[in-house]
Amino acid sequence: GSDSKENKEEAKGEEKKTIRLAAGDPMKEELINAIKGDFEKKGYKLEVSVIEDPIASNNAIEEGSLEANFIQHNAYMTSYNEEHKGDLVAVGDAIYYPCMGVYSNKVKDMKDLTEGMEIGIPRDPTNRSRALRFLEAEGLLKLKEGVEEYSQLEIEENKLNLKLTEVDSESIPTILDDLDAGVCYPIAMKEAGFDPESALAFDPPEIGKEYGILIAVSEKNKDAQWAKDLQEAMSEEKANEIIMEYFGESAVHVSEY
Amino acid sequence: MNDPALVIKSVMMPALVESLYMTFWGTVFSCILGFGLAVILVVTAEDGLSPHKWVYRLLNVLVNTLRSFPFIILAVTIIPITRAVMGTSIGTNAALFPLVIVACPFVARVFEGNLKAVTPGMIEAAKAFGASNMQIIFKIMLKEAIPAMCISVTLVVISILGSSSMAGALGAGGLGNVALIYGYQSFNDLIMYGTVFILVVLVQTIQSIGNLLYNKLK
Amino acid sequence: MNDPALVIKSVMMPALVESLYMTFWGTVFSCILGFGLAVILVVTAEDGLSPHKWVYRLLNVLVNTLRSFPFIILAVTIIPITRAVMGTSIGTNAALFPLVIVACPFVARVFEGNLKAVTPGMIEAAKAFGASNMQIIFKIMLKEAIPAMCISVTLVVISILGSSSMAGALGAGGLGNVALIYGYQSFNDLIMYGTVFILVVLVQTIQSIGNLLYNKLK
Amino acid sequence: MIKIKNLDKSFGELHVLKNVSLEVQKGEIFGLIGKSGEGKSTLLRCINLLEKRDGGTITLNGQAADFKRSREVREYRKGIGMIFQHFSLLERQNVYKNIAAPMECWGYSKQEIDEKVRELVKIVGIEDKLYEKPRNLSGGQRQRVAIARALSMDPQVLLSDEATSALDPQTTQSILQLLRDINERLGITILLVTHEMEVIRSICHRVAIMEHGEVADCGKVSEIFLNQPGSLKRLLGETAEVLPEEGVNIRMVFKETEENRSLIPDITCATSVRFSVIYSRLEKFRDEVICTTMLNVQEEDLAKVTAYLDTLNIRWEVALHE
Amino acid sequence: MIKIKNLDKSFGELHVLKNVSLEVQKGEIFGLIGKSGEGKSTLLRCINLLEKRDGGTITLNGQAADFKRSREVREYRKGIGMIFQHFSLLERQNVYKNIAAPMECWGYSKQEIDEKVRELVKIVGIEDKLYEKPRNLSGGQRQRVAIARALSMDPQVLLSDEATSALDPQTTQSILQLLRDINERLGITILLVTHEMEVIRSICHRVAIMEHGEVADCGKVSEIFLNQPGSLKRLLGETAEVLPEEGVNIRMVFKETEENRSLIPDITCATSVRFSVIYSRLEKFRDEVICTTMLNVQEEDLAKVTAYLDTLNIRWEVALHE
Ligand SMILES: Nc1ncnc2c1ncn2[C@@H]1O[C@H](COP(=O)(O)OP(=O)(O)OP(=O)(O)O)[C@@H](O)[C@H]1O
Ligand SMILES: Nc1ncnc2c1ncn2[C@@H]1O[C@H](COP(=O)(O)OP(=O)(O)OP(=O)(O)O)[C@@H](O)[C@H]1O
Ligand SMILES: [Mg+2]
Ligand SMILES: [Mg+2]
């Protein structure tokens, strides 16, 4: 982003100078911090906080305690808007598209998964749904059609009678020894000291594209200059580098869909 | 997800069972262990039956340390032990272990308070007729403290029921987990408040039983 | 994230301050409210100073209901109230509100237990010299129960410190949150155990102060 | 002053007070005696409304003790000091605070309280224990704290439940002297429960004997002790008298007068009978002196002695060996 | 049996027991009297090791009470029954359980316990309160539970701290009779603290008077009461005697014998003096009878009377009006 004179004036004038942005977790926080300097050079002051709970985070935007957050993907934001009568919108495209992987300390290949094995999947609804769809794509399950968010209740067929255990997605690496396999984000594996690339499989881009993490703002700020500047800053080279460093090449779906 | 009957049958009912299971056994084990700890704390305290500075300090630190851990961190930290004891680190039984470990210092503290509240005169009387420390604890202090301990156990049961909702992180269902995941995070108010309602009824029942016992025993 | 000095300066220190802030004010407010509730419970109970069946039942149910909610659900449920009271729904101050709401029924219960343990003879003596119910509560029961309440407050402080780690989900920092998010979820053992260590020291200190006060006052 | 009419009180099945009626005059020291468990404490507790009565009326100064508002109950109790049988001290508070508690409740000034407390501890003799907690006091010291507390509000009426039971004779006397003093100086009415006859004798005007939850006898102390009703005998039981087996024992109880002051020598002079004096005592009952004498005479001398007694109008009876 | 030597005990600054030495014989009933707060309870508590002494030795049956192991302490205490001044009952347990508690601790069989409890409640007269909790008992009933509990283990030694202070005269007598019985039948040694002289007189063999944390006087009860040492006088204080202002009051204290049985008529016969008997009592001190007599004679008759008393070898003194 080129900093035009106009931008600066807007930032000083009718637009807020201080932008309060909540990240969903420390990794996202770090990402934001990486571009903070660049963004602030455009005449803003960026206040970053970490709010783990997406609903609380979204509520805060609605009530005006935050200007934006960096925590969710589009599907989630849509259901939030529906359920909480929200008016959140994405400023632009998703910033990055992390993919999920199936990891195991016991088997070396997806084909080695056998009857009755226990697979850990995230318990939070979004990630659980994604994991189920992932397993369907791998041909292990068959899910009901036309559901937005899947839970185990919508499994029509479980070919191997896999036992799907819902746990905190962050704890999967830790308890992987007690599972036959686990579905989780490579970032978790990486931070837990495993090789994120060692997945038996990554979920396909057609699923992944729905789960890009975006910057959400209130509808009225959709076209605000600061929002555009923020989106731009986040999409820059520097951010991308960090993302790649964090996830590893194969653990992120390409950034353009 | 939006079919209430199905949700009740295949989500809430098992969760209720799991909650009851974890709460029951959690209470039983943590009360036993916590009572043991409380007894040792009371006995070895400076003004106790058999003062023992170092044992007291050590236990005190242990109890405080265990109480300092956020539940999930404790649960993760002790996974190797959980695994050794329970065979696995996930599921209801595995969650029971950290639940108990977290609850028992709390139990120890409240029981300690209850036992300390026993009038010294009675303990003296028991000493005077030659009761051993064990007898003083079990036949005198325990019996005298029982009504207060009833209230404490009620407190503990409800606390464990509360923490069991965090055990969901390790694959142990329970109502709290359902309320969080199927209700709150899935934007399903029916499930959320439905589950909370069940929890309210449960807590209410536990409290009523506790009060009833207290009034019987006091 | 792996530079310990940086972590300490920019993550742990602010979190420590926030923890102390939340714990302090959380304790103050929940003790005041909880004490009020406890007093009403004790006074209106069947064998209380001025029995009042319906008030008692109502409060009892209220307390139980509040205790039934998992923290985060309660926090979200009462967001409108939080917003009205604190002006915002996120951050340390906003988290304080549900923290207090969750803690005060707990406080009420333990204080209730403490107050109930006051020997009836003393209350009678006070009645006999014409003390009003308020005086009996504040000059007699409270004074007699204070050592036990010291232990209870210690329990409460540590509980609030504990729950404040859950408040992190609402953007209120605090040590528990740091341990969880920067430690546990980021698989950073240094931060995790470092923070837990600070928590242990904190809890230890709180407990020691509590014990000291107890021994002074008893 | 205090008028109790048809008071009834049961604890479940146990009918403790049955139709008890009593009247205590203003400025009177009234004793209440009876066997253990006959309901004396319960009666006192009913009077200051700590125990709900099942029936009957209690009137203080002509005003019935039936109150609707708690303020009235408090005012009523303010005028009544109570010394509990079990002392009921505030265990966490020191002697000073214990004694000051009623005054603090009634909003006395700091200085008034301080003066009063210091005066009272001196009177009951525990001035060196002012800042001790009750648990560090001896039984008698605890009791004296309770006494001081009950007196702190200068009550019109003092209900005292065995206020001197844990005290040695000398301290008992000084406490009794104190009660007597305030009774005389301030006209305070005292209703006291005791099992020490000494206490009744030395300070009470009237006494009531409770038996099976009823007032068996009631009257002037000297008269009750003179007449020795069955209830009193049953209460006192076999006394430590040494009644000789041989001969006849004659008991005489009479008010001392000029004439009978030298009764015993007079008997000897008049009858020339050789007898032994089992006991003889002059007892002071506040205002009069009663002489109780037991003589042991030979069977054959009995008539002579009693005939002489009759001439003097002295009541006598033959005491049986038990 | 119990031998206390140079016992010392302080609470902080307060030197409560100063070099106390006492010896209680086997089978003896030993009384301990003294003003409130003089350390009587503390002495008892030192004896059964509830209070740590600062110095001195305690020997029971020739064995020093210095134990290393708690088992020994327990065995030692097993042989010592204690009735506490404040009863110290187990408040949550009923009378039955309270009395049974020591036996349960020592592993008696259910049947033994049941028999013993039922026997004891009958003896102390609270059989109708067997299943009541202490808080529903009257003061005297509570005390009797404490007595029954202390006796439940058939101790060799009974330490009794004001065991009858809350009891009416008749119940007191029956409890004292009980203590006397078990003392005679089972040879139990009793050390009892009391402030009721009646109790001392009626059952104690010997008595010690404590003053300022020291044993001021100690001896046979009859002798102490005969000699009336200063400590005793101070303890009893001014008695309720009515000493006439006119004339001279002569006090005589003597052991009753064949010769002096009819002393008073004999004086009259021998001296023809008209005097009045202020009091005269024959008191039974367990084994002997002591006669205390106070006569009021005219100044001019004094010499005659005392001369006669001297011939009989009866000790007399002139009592001063206070
Ligand atoms: N709260 C209660 N519940 C049941 N019974 C009670 C209660 N209080 C007292 N009693 C019973 O009532 C009777 C009278 O008790 P009270 O205390 O009035 O006796 P008392 O005359 O004062 O005896 P004492 O001289 O032993 O103190 C006793 O038999 C006692 O057991
Ligand atoms: N735990 C204690 N701490 C401090 N002082 C104490 C303690 N116990 C007793 N005392 C003091 O020691 C003295 C002796 O107390 P003790 O109870 O032995 O008296 P006592 O002779 O039994 O008197 P009483 O006849 O009134 O029961 C008292 O002055 C009392 O205040
Ligand atoms: Mg009584
Ligand atoms: Mg004593």
Image (tube, coloured by chain):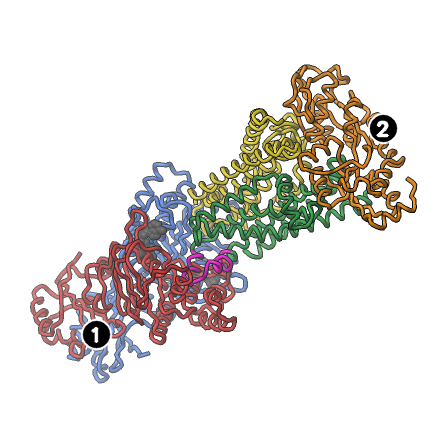
Chain colours: A orange, B yellow, C green, D red, E blue
> Callout 2 environment at 10 Å: few (<14), some (14 to 19), or many (20+)?
few
Foreground of the two, E175 or C6: C6
Is B177 rendered above or below residue C38? above
Q: Position of residue A150 (x, y in %)?
A: 68, 25
> Callout 1 environment at 10 Å: few (<14), some (14 to 19), or many (20+)?
many
Query: If the image is split into quadrants, where does the C terminus of chain C sit?
Result: bottom right
Q: Position of residue C175 (x, y in %)?
A: 71, 44
Q: Position of residue C104 (x, y in %)?
A: 58, 48
Tell me the quarter of the picture where residue E94 sits. top left
Q: Residue, x 11% and y 74% (percent of image)? A: D312
| Residue to which mark 1 is pinned | E277
Amino acid type, label 2 = Glu
Tell me the quarter of the picture where residue E195 sits. bottom left
Foreground of the two, C153 or A185: A185
Q: Position of residue C81 (x, y in %)?
A: 63, 47
Is D96 rendered above or below residue E242? above
